[in-house]
Amino acid sequence: MPRLRGGSDEISNWQPLCDECNNFKSTACRDCQLDCETCCWTYPEKFKPFHIPGELVKCLREHAQKLGRNPDELLTEIITNYIENQN
């Protein structure tokens, strides 16, 4: 957790990052008001963002446009329906 957000200097709060990632994290955390306990920058092992290949994103956007839907809402619906049908 960043020190500016209440993180400590204890070794348990250290996160080894390359210069580029440290810069990304600093920029992402600047003026952020979200709860660090649910952030992928603080806990990447728990909240790592999903990677969706660009071609799949393109297909989703095209399909959503044909349906007159918001791509984010359509993706949420697809995933929700998939999970519900697995039970």
Image (cartoon, rainbow, N blue to C red):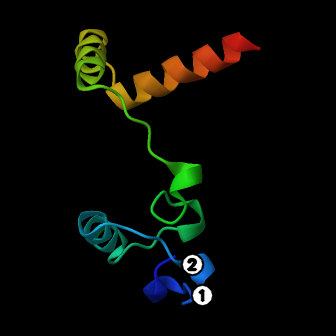
Residue furthest to the right in view is 87
Can you identify the residue that label 1 sits on? 10
Displayed quadrant of residue 28: bottom left
Tell me the CA gap for discs 1 and 2. 6 Å
Which amino acid type corresponds to the residue marked 1 in the rendered image? Glu
Q: Are marks 1 and 2 in contact (CB under 8 Å)?
A: yes
Q: Secondary structure at mark 2?
A: helix
Q: Amino acid at mark 2?
A: Asn
Q: Quadrant of residue 17?
A: bottom left
Q: Residue 34 location, x and y as percent?
A: 48, 68
Q: Residue at x 26, y 14 (%)?
A: 59
User: Residue 31: x percent and y percent?
Assistant: 34, 77
Eyeballing the image, is 1 above or below 60?
below
Along the horizontal axis of the image, is 86 left or right of 28? Answer: right
> Tag 1, which secondary structure?
loop
Q: Vertical placement of 56 versus 8: above or below?
A: above
Quadrant holding the C terminus:
top right
Identify the residue under disc 2. Answer: 13
8 on left or right of 63:
right
Could you tell me how many numbered marks the image carries?
A: 2
